[in-house]
Amino acid sequence: MARFLDNPEACLQAGNSTLTELIYGWGNEAWSAREEFLACCINYALTVKGPILECGSGLSTLLIAAITKQTNQPHWVLEHKPNWASRVQSYLDDYGLHAHITPCALKDYGEFCWYDVPLNELARQFSLIVCDGPPSRTTKGGRYGLIPIMKEWIAPGCVILLDDAYRREEREIAERWASELNATYTIECKDKPYILMSVTSQY
């Protein structure tokens, strides 16, 4: 982690083992995002000019928080498990990092369940959204609720990163999002695919 904090961009270089070691050290390998997805999160966090939203918290939260400490961009995180939110917060505190971790239960919106988001407390016009929650397989509608609930909080030109694109449900959600946002997307990485979606200036 000290290596990453010293130079986040270095982990994007070919052959750099920092992300692999961080995933191992995080100790949640069955659920943690893989190197390629984390690298994509880091790459966009380094370049976006606007607030960042994460759906679900974990190692990515620490890495993005390390970058926003440098870029001074607001970083908000939605997490439905209070104990997990506390654990991630303790790591942030240990490393002198900050993110607005927002514990919020999952709410039934009819067609789907999603975070019961305190919308009035969030930043507006998110430029990067990292979606790795809520748990897709145990949540009605999976991660679909991001767009119907947060659409007005998404900036034109926003990049949305949706993990777990090896699952048919995630790919179907991406199709719906793309239609509702007038967005385009690609499926990246063969090992553990994820979706890279770009929102156009009009939707």
Image (cartoon, rainbow, N blue to C red):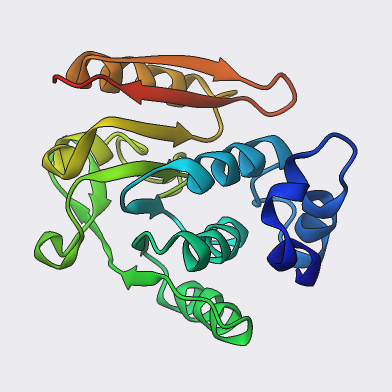
- Residue 3 drawn at (x, y percent): 80, 65
Residue 179: quadrant of the picture: top left
Nearest the eye: 203 or 114 = 203
Query: In this image, 115 relative to 129: left or right?
Result: left
Nearest the eye: 105 or 184 = 184
**Which residue is drawn at the image coordinates 36% and 52% (left, top)?**
52
Judge whether 52 appears above or below 155 on screen.
Answer: below
- Residue 183 drawn at (x, y percent): 29, 17
Nearest the eye: 80 or 126 = 126
**Which residue is drawn at the image coordinates 17% and 52% (left, top)?**
124
Q: How many marks?
A: 0
Judge whether 166 appears above or below 127 on screen.
Answer: above
- Residue 33 drawn at (x, y percent): 64, 46
Query: In this image, 96 relative to 129: left or right?
Result: right
Residue 200: quadrant of the picture: top left
Residue 92: quadrant of the picture: bottom right
Judge whether 194 appears above or below 202 on screen.
Answer: below
**Which residue is drawn at the image coordinates 15% and 65% (left, top)?**
118
Judge whether 161 appears above or below 24 on screen.
Answer: above
Query: In this image, 71 relative to 150: left or right?
Result: right
Q: Quadrant of the C terminus?
A: top left
- Residue 9 drawn at (x, y percent): 69, 48
Q: Quadrant of the N terminus?
A: bottom right
**Which residue is drawn at the image coordinates 67% and 22% (left, top)?**
189
Query: In this image, 62 relative to 52: left or right?
Result: right
